[in-house]
């Protein structure tokens, strides 16, 4: 391992030479006689620790400290002072100093403070390296892409990850990678080293869902574990809880979830004592929660609790530019898994992949590539390898047309128009120009219809004033 580099900033030449002699046995010392010289050296050399005298010619130690922190806010700085000036020392600690030493320096104390500071640095570097390794290991396959839509999702995830406990709502069709976006937010947040716990609200019976969410106490019901069981919320304490397919929550569970989101406390099933946890909640759904609210199947107050920051993950149909990069990514992955040697995708096969509707989105694309790599041989994925897919240009005209049919009982045309406008606004994140494009009408026409039908665009965009409005 390279030796730590320590910058000594002091105008006392005798002390400079003494500290250089002491430190040279274990570390690489640099010397600066003023704050100005220290700042010049820091711009030229990587430094692990700064020993900074408070009283310096020119700019003093406190000002130098502030300027160093402006260059590198994580750099460890130990202040040195010939005066036991508590006020100045406290001020330097408030400005970001790691520790302080009082002159004349006691060698044992000096070495102890240096070792403690560098051990802190070593541990911080280990944590950073672990996080980098975790992020590298964490698969972003389902959100890899070049399209504008998915890049907006990337930007959203990066921004919302900075909020420690901001509740997030992720909408999108099945298979678009909503869980991967949720994990992306978790991995880039301050909770990255804490649990990420998911629960599929649609895969658990309504009788068991509350006990899965909130846990249960000993003897709460027949057939439960004798000692009771922790729920997903408690298991996610300090980390992130993903409520997948949240639209499937039955009414009683919606009430209890709302209460939890308001108080961050809950009663386990059969319990009489509240438990308090610190979790970030991310909800995901393949349905429009706004439409569910309008239909009366989802509580409006819970919707607003979940809809603090909202993003819609686009389908593959909306991000065709990503299909080939994703297919190549999966091809390389399954090459390694199945010891195959596919090197690319033939032009006709590329055309077929791009034209296919991928109603199962990325999940379906991944499964298709896995099948080809496992079952076929060669250096390229050929069009013949994809014959098992039913392509739209082989389908009838009726299959290509939207499946809108007037029911026997008839429809209310104004209500249908309003619903289509609402859906377009939700898909575009409240962007009127994109919504108009989705509907095939002009922006002024859309604005006229929004006003006519009394549609509240801000509510549908799912973006509060503090949330990026360009997402989704």
Image (cartoon, helix red, strand yellow):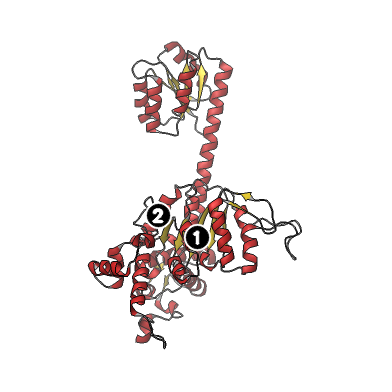
159 or 12: nearer the viewer: 159
Kindly identify the residue that appears in the image at 26 percent across and 66 percent down: 447
Task: Tell me the quarter of the picture where residue 310 sits.
Answer: bottom left
35 or 189: nearer the viewer: 189
Q: CA distance from mark 1 to mark 2?
A: 22 Å
Which of labels 1 and 2 is toward the front?
Answer: 1
From the viewer's perspective, is residue 132 above or below residue 229? above
How far across and down, in percent of the image, does residue 375 sit?
A: 51, 75
Q: Disc 1, disc 2: CB below 8 Å? A: no
From the viewer's perspective, is residue 277 above or below residue 287? above
Residue wearing tag 1: 302
How far across and down, in percent of the image, does residue 321 sit?
A: 34, 66
Residue wearing tag 2: 156
Kindly identify the residue that appears in the image at 35 percent across and 82 percent down: 401
How far across and down, in percent of the image, does residue 102 sit?
A: 51, 16
Q: Earlier in the sequence, mark 1 or mark 2?
A: 2
Mark 2 Cα shell of 10 Å, populated few (<14), some (14-19), many (≥20)? many
Mark 1 Cα shell of 10 Å, populated few (<14), some (14-19), many (≥20)? some
> What label sits on residue 133 in the rendered view?
none
Which type of secondary structure does the marked residue at label 1 adopt?
helix
Quick check: can you spot residue 368?
yes
Which type of secondary structure does the marked residue at label 2 adopt?
helix
Tag count in the figure? Answer: 2
Kindly identify the residue that appears in the image at 38 percent across and 81 percent down: 392
How far across and down, in percent of the image, does residue 286 sit?
A: 47, 68
80 or 388: nearer the viewer: 80
Quadrant housing the C terminus: bottom left
Quick check: can you spot residue 20?
no
């Amino acid at each position: 391992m390279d030796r730590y580099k320590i910058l000594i900033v002091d105008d006392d030449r005798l002390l400079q030479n003494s500290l250089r002699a002491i430190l040279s046995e274990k570390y690489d010392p640099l010397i600066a006689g003023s704050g100005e010289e220290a700042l010049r050296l820091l711009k030229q050399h990587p430094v692990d620790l700064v020993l900074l005298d408070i009283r310096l010619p020119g700019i003093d130690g406190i000002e130098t400290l502030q300027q160093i922190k402006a260059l590198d806010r994580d750099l460890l700085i130990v202040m040195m002072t010939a005066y036991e000036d508590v006020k100045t020392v406290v001020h330097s600690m408030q400005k970001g100093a790691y520790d302080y030493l009082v002159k004349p320096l006691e060698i044992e104390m000096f070495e102890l403070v240096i070792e403690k500071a560098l051990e802190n640095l070593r541990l911080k570097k280990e944590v950073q390296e672990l996080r980098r390794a975790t992020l590298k290991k964490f698969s972003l396959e389902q959100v890899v892409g070049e399209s504008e839509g998915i890049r907006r999702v990337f930007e959203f995830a990066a921004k919302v990850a900075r909020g420690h406990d901001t509740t997030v709502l992720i909408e999108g069709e099945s298979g678009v990678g909503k869980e991967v976006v949720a994990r992306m937010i978790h991995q880039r947040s301050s909770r990255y080293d804490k649990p990420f716990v998911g629960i599929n609200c649609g895969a658990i019976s309504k009788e068991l869902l509350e006990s899965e969410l909130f846990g249960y106490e000993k003897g709460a019901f027949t057939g439960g574990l004798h000692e009771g069981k922790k729920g997903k919320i408690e298991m996610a304490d300090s980390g992130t809880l993903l409520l997948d397919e949240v639209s499937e929550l039955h009414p009683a569970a919606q009430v209890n979830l709302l209460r939890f989101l308001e108080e961050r406390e809950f009663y386990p099933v059969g319990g009489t004592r509240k438990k308090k946890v610190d979790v970030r909640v991310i909800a995901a759904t393949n349905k429009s929660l706004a439409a569910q609210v309008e239909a009366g199947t989802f509580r409006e107050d819970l919707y607003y609790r979940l809809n603090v920051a909202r993003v819609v993950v686009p389908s593959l149909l909306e991000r065709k530019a990503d299909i080939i990069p994703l297919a190549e990514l999966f091809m390389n992955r399954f090459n390694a898994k199945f010891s195959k040697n596919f090197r690319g995708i033939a032009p006709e096969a590329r055309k077929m992949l791009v034209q296919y509707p991928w109603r199962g989105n990325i999940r379906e694309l991944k499964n298709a590539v896995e099948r080809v790599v496992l079952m076929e041989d060669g250096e390229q994925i050929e069009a013949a390898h994809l014959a098992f897919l039913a392509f739209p240009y082989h389908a009838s005209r009726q299959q290509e047309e939207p499946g809108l049919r007037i029911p026997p009982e008839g429809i209310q045309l104004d209500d249908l128009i309003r619903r289509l406008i609402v859906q377009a606004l939700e898909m575009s994140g409240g962007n009127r120009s994109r919504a108009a494009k989705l509907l095939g009408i002009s922006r002024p026409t859309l604005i006229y219809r929004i006003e006519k039908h009394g549609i509240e665009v801000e509510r549908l965009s799912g973006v509060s004033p503090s949330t990026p409005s360009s997402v989704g």
